[in-house]
Image (cartoon, grey):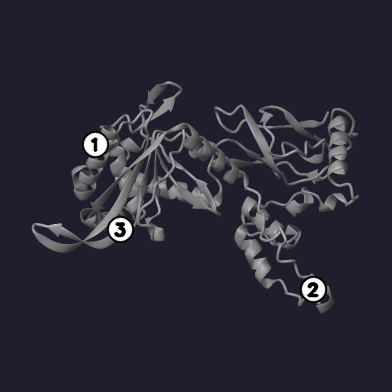
Amino acid sequence: MPVEVILPKVDMDMETGTIEAWHVKEGDLVRQGDTIFEIGTNKAVMEVEAPASGAIRGIKLETGVPITVGTPVAWIYLDGEAATTPSEPAAAAASVAAATSNPEGASPASGASAAQSVAPGLRATPLARRMARQNGLDLKAVAGTGPRGRIGEADVKRHLEQRPRCAPAQETRPAPVPAASNSEGRLQPFSAIRRIVANRLSESMRTAPHFYLTSEIEMSASRDLLRRLAARHERIGVPKPSITVLIARIAARILRDHPVINASAEGEATRFHERIDIGIAMERDGDLVVPVLRDAGNMDMPAMTREFARLRDGMARRTLTPAELGGGTFTISNLGMYGVDSFTAIINPPQGAILAVGQTVDKPVGRDGQIVLRPMANFTLSSDHRIVDGVAAARFMADLREALESPEVLL
């Protein structure tokens, strides 16, 4: 009997998912463990591997449509098995769909499956596949340097840099496009992660009445503490702490005294969370991801620094699970390293607040009747007015200022 390929449950609260991209096409030979498609949830995009070796048939080609967990999306026929039911109806439907979407009679190699540029048995990261598609590169020509020959972004870049460039022939120059053409510019569909982010943040702006409080806070003491912590961490073999980690550590401590800022709205009720799980907004390949520091309220600085480094590395390598990318109770977004002075962030639903951090800049301020230079940074709290009132948010910001200006009191 053929082996069913089902839409797997990759998160505890997952009921449906979407196939974002197939990496194989009808009839391809696959090996157990090969990546065959990507599944999108409301938190992340994950790779799904073949459960057996054989010929894959009956592929449900439609992507981006919600599918119930456990639904068969293809079958794998072992060596010597005849491709009969149950795959034939699905395969026939796939053929009809392909013919409908390709009335000119183009070969399947020109369709979406071939655009993945991945042959059966090849192992490649999603970023490597994306780069290959964008550059018209067949990944069979790329040597992978990762585990089990997995092809990564660096492998594709290296191959593209070494690939000879051909001068375009004069007679093949494209005709000039009229100035009034509506096709000017490049239309790029949302990536799977970008679509998830767009939907969640649009939902947040529709349902959560945002209001914003900004405080300009002196960072002299926090800077001095970071320098001392860096020396201490080096002695005990812990990564150097960043300003983001310090802010997360201080926020986690303050949130104990401000449970409504660590709460979320559920219908017409407020959910007060027992734990403090802080999400840290990060950028990966142009997309927004938010790994979560679990139980941050009970972490000391070395533990939080280690966990932050692990999440950052896992984010870059695309090894984080949906459970590590969702379920936070409060989020911090720091754009100071990009030279941003201040900004307002959109709340990550269903959370009740998010803290936006700007860059630290030396500014003239008044101290003891004198004008002096001090490192100052803008902190902006976005709150959901359904559960957080202005005074509650202001008290949190006041405690945040006091803690950042005297951080050793809390640490």
Tag 1: amino acid: Arg
Q: Nearer the viewer, residue 384 or 220?
A: 384
Q: Nearer the viewer, mark 2 or mark 3?
A: 2
Total number of numbered discs in the rendering: 3
- As measured in the structure, the alpha-carbon distance from the residue carrying label 2 to the one carrying label 1 is 65 Å
Residue picked out by circle 1: 395
Q: Residue at x 44, y 33 (%)?
A: 208
Tag 2: amino acid: Arg
The quarter of the rendered structure image containing the C terminus is top left
Q: Residue at x 82, y 31 (%)?
A: 2
Tag 3: amino acid: Thr
Residue 277, image x, y percentages = 39, 36
Residue picked out by circle 3: 360
Tell me the number on the disc at residue 267.
Answer: none
Residue 66, image x, y percentages = 67, 32
As helix, strand or loop, the secondary structure at mark 3 comes to loop
The crowd level at tag 2 (other Cα within 10 Å; few <14, some 14-19, many 20+) is few
Does residue 118 show up? no
Residue picked out by circle 2: 173
- As measured in the structure, the alpha-carbon distance from the residue carrying label 2 to the one carrying label 3 is 51 Å
Give the mark nearest the N terminus, 2 or 3: 2
Identify whether 405 is placed above or below 13.
below
Q: Residue furthest top?
A: 268
Give the mark nearest the N terminus, 1 or 3: 3
Does residue 174 show up? yes
Identify whether 218 is placed above or below 345.
below
Give the mark nearest the N terminus, 2 or 1: 2
Identify whether 132 is placed above or below 170.
above
- As measured in the structure, the alpha-carbon distance from the residue carrying label 1 to the one carrying label 3 is 22 Å
The crowd level at tag 1 (other Cα within 10 Å; few <14, some 14-19, many 20+) is few
Residue 18, image x, y percentages = 66, 36
